[in-house]
Amino acid sequence: MSKFKFIETKIKDVYIIEPTVFGDNRGYFMETYNKDEFLAAGLQYEFLQDNQSSSRRGVLRGLHFQKTYPQAKLVRVLKGEVYDVAVDLRKNSKTYGQWQGVLLSEENKRQFMIPRGFAHGFLVVSDYAEFAYKCDDRYHPEDEGGIAYDDPSLNIDWMAQLGDGEIILSEKDKKLPKLQEIKMAF
């Protein structure tokens, strides 16, 4: 029996992953990653770095990518809830410029597998969230790129997930270009 359910999305190679959770009156146990299980599902990644962040309600981080050193990411939420989005930037993809979103929370324990060649971002929809992700390449600050979260060509309805409140961006993310303005694709 597999310890994971791998759910295909409308975008090739992007998966929502549901781990099997074993719970009783003491709490629960689950595997968040198992190389053999992922390989059996056709997901061949060699993760090199784990990252964790915390944010408050309304914080939107993204949409980010690395230009020369693209990263595949396996993302999940430890506390709270986020709306997580991946945008396809693969130049030969039939879904170039399309995006997939998913609610990730400590309750649903879902994970989101994002391959190389995507921009990634998330919006905190709970009061507080802790977010963790594995990457198959290291962070290269000199290689950062990004797309504006509110690019009209993407039409991501972040506010439908947030409801009341305002989106909080870093100064860097406020200056990100639109998709049509970036001069690269994977």
Image (tube, grey):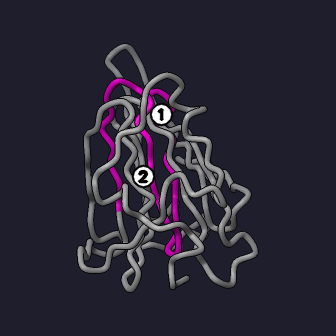
The amino acid type found where label 2 is placed reads Val
Mark 1–mark 2 CB contact (< 8 Å): no
* SS at circle 1: loop
Q: Vertical placement of 155 versus 141: above or below?
A: above
Q: Which residue is most to the top?
A: 25
Q: Which residues are magenta?
A: 107-134
Q: Position of residue 85 (x, y in %)?
A: 54, 52
Q: Quadrant of residue 23?
A: top left
* SS at circle 2: strand
Q: Position of residue 87 (x, y in %)?
A: 58, 62
Q: Vertical placement of 163 versus 181: above or below?
A: above
Q: Nearer the viewer, residue 9 or 63?
A: 63
Residue depicted at 69% across the width and 84% down the height: 92
The amino acid type found where label 1 is placed reads Val
Q: CA distance from mark 1 to mark 2?
A: 17 Å
Whether residue 1 appears in this view of the structure is no
Mark 2 lies on residue: 75
Residue depicted at 26% across the width and 56% down the height: 51
Q: Magenta includes 35?
A: no
Q: Position of residue 180 (x, y in %)?
A: 59, 74
Q: Position of residue 161 (x, y in %)?
A: 56, 32
Q: Earlier in the sequence, mark 1 or mark 2?
A: 1
Mark 1 lies on residue: 21
Q: Few, some or many C-alpha atoms within 10 Å of disc 2 (few <14, some 14-19, many ≥20)?
A: many
Q: Few, some or many C-alpha atoms within 10 Å of disc 1 (few <14, some 14-19, many ≥20)?
A: some
Residue depicted at 29% across the width and 71% down the height: 48
Q: Quadrant of residue 81?
A: top left
Q: Nearer the viewer, residue 115 or 121?
A: 121
Residue depth check, mark 1 versus mark 2: number of the one nearer the observer: 2
